[in-house]
Amino acid sequence: MAVQRERSTLAPGRTGRKVSVLPYLFLLPMLVSFIVFNLIPVFWSLGLSFTNYNLITPAHFVGLSNYRHALLQSSLFWLAVRHTVWFVLAVPLGVAISLSAAFLINALPWGQGLFRFIYYLPSALSSIAMGVLWAFLISFGSHSILSQVMADIGFPAGLNFTGPNLFLAFVLFSGMLVGWGPGMVIFSAGLRGIDQELYDAGKLDGATGMKATWYLTLPQLRLTLMYVIITGMIGAFQVFESLFVIGSLGTGSQFGPLNSGLTLVPLIYEKAFSYMQFGYASAIAFLMLAVIMVLTIISMRLGQGGTALGK
């Protein structure tokens, strides 16, 4: 019976050999789900980006008007771009901190798992829960808990993190704190995967200390660095939940006072679901997608030492 059941799942391949169709049957639900809930919506929203659609009246084709309005006429779009750039520029700093933490934790003689758990803990909590916590810390403006703590450790008294000048910096720091944990775990795994014999051979050539880190460790972590940087950049473009929660609960404004925390994804959300401008929101989304693709390709080429992609 077992032999007959196995043969029933075989089909002739192009080379004449029997190919099992069972793996494809298991993959079929995921493939259908990807097509229905991911691929089709992407192409549908691409078509919407060339229309004026408000979910009530039929879509009206407007060509490149949505893209033209975003790039040439909308000051709010460029404000969101500037704020998003700050999140993207913070990615290398977050990567450096995560890598440093991985070095330090892996060098501990004992308790590596404990310190790795403590360092990762903020990332394990949901972004909504962390947003509520951060909003609680900055509530009441210059009289907030965080302002008092900052004054106690030497910073100027009366810092107002709910104001337009400090709100973006606070949200940026809170986002970086959550993002350090996953990077640390990935770098720790990468460091443990480096063969110790490589360092033993390097000592014969004088590669010790920082030289070993620069000439041996970092080249071995090149692909890991590339992965963490690319995923970090994508995450920086997509920041939304914590920003929305901190702004709404901490300042009473969805994206901070005077849109001081407005980035591209919140702008897409606002245009689509507050103003029913689905075509314009789709255009902004695809502009953001184009930038992410360009930065990803650049990062991959740099991470591969200038070689062509896929080689």
Image (cartoon, grey):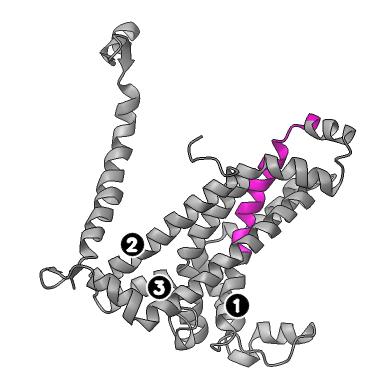
| Numbered disc 1: secondary structure | helix
| Numbered disc 3: secondary structure | helix
Could you tell me which residue is drawn at 55 percent across and 57 percent down?
232
Q: In the rendered structure, does residue 302 fall within the stretch colored magenta?
A: no
**Residue 260: x and y, percent?**
49, 83
Could you tell me which residue is drawn at 78 percent across and 46 percent down?
213
Q: What stretch is highlighted in magenta?
A: 177-197
Q: Is residue 22 visible?
A: yes
The answer to whether the residue labelled 2 contacts the one labelled 3, judged by CB atoms less than 8 Å apart, is no
Instruction: Categorize mark 1 by other alpha carbons within 10 Å: few (<14), some (14-19), many (20+).
Output: some
Q: What residue type is labelled 2?
A: Phe
Q: What separation in Å lies between label 2 and label 3 (alpha carbons)?
A: 14 Å
Q: Which amino acid does label 1 sit on?
A: Phe
Whether 309 is drawn above or below 153: the answer is above
Q: In this view, does 115 lie to the left or right of 39?
A: right
Q: What residue type is labelled 3?
A: Pro
**Counting residues from the N terminus, which is met first, the one under dot 1 or under dot 2?**
1
Seen from the viewer's position, the closer of residues 308 and 157 is: 308
Q: In the rendered structure, does residue 196 fall within the stretch colored magenta?
A: yes
**Residue 290: x and y, percent?**
38, 59
Mark 1 highlights which residue?
170
Instruction: Categorize mark 2 by other alpha carbons within 10 Å: few (<14), some (14-19), many (20+).
Output: some
Whether 272 is drawn above or below 151: the answer is above
Mark 2 highlights which residue?
286
**Counting residues from the N terminus, which is met first, the one under dot 2 or under dot 3?**
3
Labelled disc at residue 266: 3
